[in-house]
Amino acid sequence: MKKLINAVGDVLAESLDGFAAAHADIVVLGEERKFVRRRSPKPGKVALVSGGGSGHEPLHAGFVGAGMLDAACPGQVFTSPTPDQMLEAAAAVETGAGVLFIVKNYEGDVMNFAMAAEMIQVPTATVLTNDDVAIENSLYTTGRRGVAGTLVVEKMLGAAAEQGAALDALKALGERANAATRSMGIALTSCTVPAAGKPTFAIGEDEMEVGVGIHGEPGRRREKLAAADAIAAELVGACVADLGLKRGAEVLLLTNGFGATPAMELYLMVHAATRVLAGAGVKPVRYLTGNYVTSLDMAGCSITLTVLDEALAKLWDAPVHTAALRWGM
Amino acid sequence: MKKLINAVGDVLAESLDGFAAAHADIVVLGEERKFVRRRSPKPGKVALVSGGGSGHEPLHAGFVGAGMLDAACPGQVFTSPTPDQMLEAAAAVETGAGVLFIVKNYEGDVMNFAMAAEMIQVPTATVLTNDDVAIENSLYTTGRRGVAGTLVVEKMLGAAAEQGAALDALKALGERANAATRSMGIALTSCTVPAAGKPTFAIGEDEMEVGVGIHGEPGRRREKLAAADAIAAELVGACVADLGLKRGAEVLLLTNGFGATPAMELYLMVHAATRVLAGAGVKPVRYLTGNYVTSLDMAGCSITLTVLDEALAKLWDAPVHTAALRWGM
């Protein structure tokens, strides 16, 4: 295992400490590193709390800040955070308007956030993300997995919460944004969980995993590595078909790396995806490109499409000031 | 070779096209993709033009925009751009106040930018970056290599140019910023140049290259992979010693990934570097963490320190709006 680490047991703590030091103007680390919260909460707004297993950085802690999340709870690598983390995070950022949990659809996360929601004393609602079109049920999920589209849902909810939307309206908006979003990815290499010390899966030097999950879970099939254009055709095509996009539709195109994918390749995928979209008469009107929802050191990428109407585009464009996404402020 | 590409000969063109599409609000691609320029030039300011071999993305095109570069010339992978690229870029962005070339210290780049400077009809000056403390002379350089610190020099020059600094003042500032900056890196894996189709160097499963260059060039030595703390001690220590930092010094800490290094490991390195700095009585007052000056798909990282005084800190903090760096606007 080749990683920039000290002891395996200290990876998460030391990484969180570095993150909190590097972004001390934006975030504060909670006691015992149970959560990362926004340094300057905005009183009176609904508190947005997300979280999940670590290893997907910058998701979620990198999206804590003005215009996006109020707190994020980091679990151990690829392991759900616990309900007490969510309760303490909520207590630290709730200011009277209730708490919205944003949860990726994995059984552990769903269960633990549900337990937190039951125990909490303030109004709560939950938005579940399940944007991965690759497969219907999986190793860790009933239904589709929540993957890179979670970023889009968190950004739009963050903007609406900042503008004063109420808890019910946010829940409806989150469900609408999730329903407008689809993703699918491929892996060129496996990730390696530090505690395991070896790759999660074996893959040939000339193979890719089509429809891979963000924990290195199996997708649709294993096959020979294809050209970027063919990969884009499958990933974009799956999203376009599942969304039922008609010619003239406008979308946000998120081209996401899994942690070890260089910018040169991601931008090449943007080019390939844009050509596929043009063939379908679909217009990308917003772009985000980078390693945002990752799987430790996995190489590969996912494509996410979100159908934009004027309201969703405005929420995407609204100011945001987090470690990983920053514009307009 | 596992890359998200189509034909090897099309990698650069397709990647640039994707980049230009994704950031059409910020940049315009020049004819025949000879340069990337700022979409909205600011008349009357000195034009800042950089460039170099591709494969280091987001350097340099990702730093084109308000508050940073006016144009960047992408060469083929790890190959200098040609003088005609620089001349056409300069012609596209020059508005009467002259042109400043920012050049990493590699023989090909130095020679080609010098030829462009001789041929150009407007006042020019050149700032050379050579921040790599790892080795004194190298395969492609007389003197030290220009590496991740180039980003810092470009950011500070961009801010000063935006504020109206004249060509002479910018040259002096660039030399001062470069003199205040040192870097050193280590590689865990080799990069693979697409046209070569195989790794640039062989490295054992338990080895690292200490002092590696950003083209995968040899550094000081090859040795067993060390713990993050030991790596940080050597990288930070080398920069602190070479800068002659005294207790109480304030620095910008740039923790840079080489293209395949996940955020979790980079933030762990931030933590490790911060501890080493604390031991030396040096205070990091600004942080930048991410894959910014890369070597294709190489795993590993570099540490860059820039000694900050009030003037340099202000230039760092000044608004910037580029594909890869954005704050304050």
Image (spheres, coloured by chain):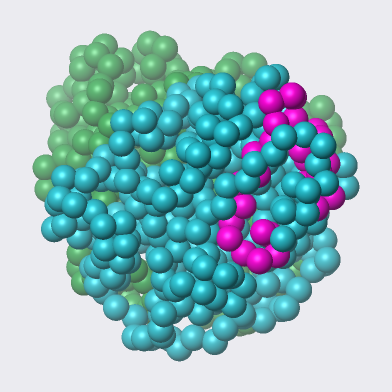
Chain colours: A green, B cyan
Residue A231 visible somewhere in the drawing: no
On the image, the x and y values in percent for residue B32 come to 88, 47
| In this picture, residue B18 sits left or right of residue B262 | right
On the image, the x and y values in percent for residue A130 come to 50, 43
Of the pair B319 and A251, the residue shown nearer to us: B319
Residue B57 visible somewhere in the drawing: yes
In the image, the segment drawn in magenta is B83-110
Q: In this view, does A155 lie above or below A98?
A: below
Of the pair A259 and B30, the residue shown nearer to us: B30
What residue is drawn where x is 70% and y is 31%?
B98
Quarter containing the N terminus of chain B: bottom right
- The verdict on residue B87 being magenta is yes
What residue is drawn where x is 45% and y is 58%?
B131
On the image, the x and y values in percent for residue B117 come to 75, 47
What residue is drawn where x is 53% and y is 32%?
B169
- The verdict on residue A29 being magenta is no
Of the pair B92 and A29, the residue shown nearer to us: B92
On the image, the x and y values in percent for residue A259 come to 49, 59
Q: How many labels does the image show?
A: 0
| In this picture, residue B284 sits left or right of residue A303 | left
Q: Is residue A224 above or below residue A19?
A: below
What residue is drawn where x is 31% and y is 36%?
B309
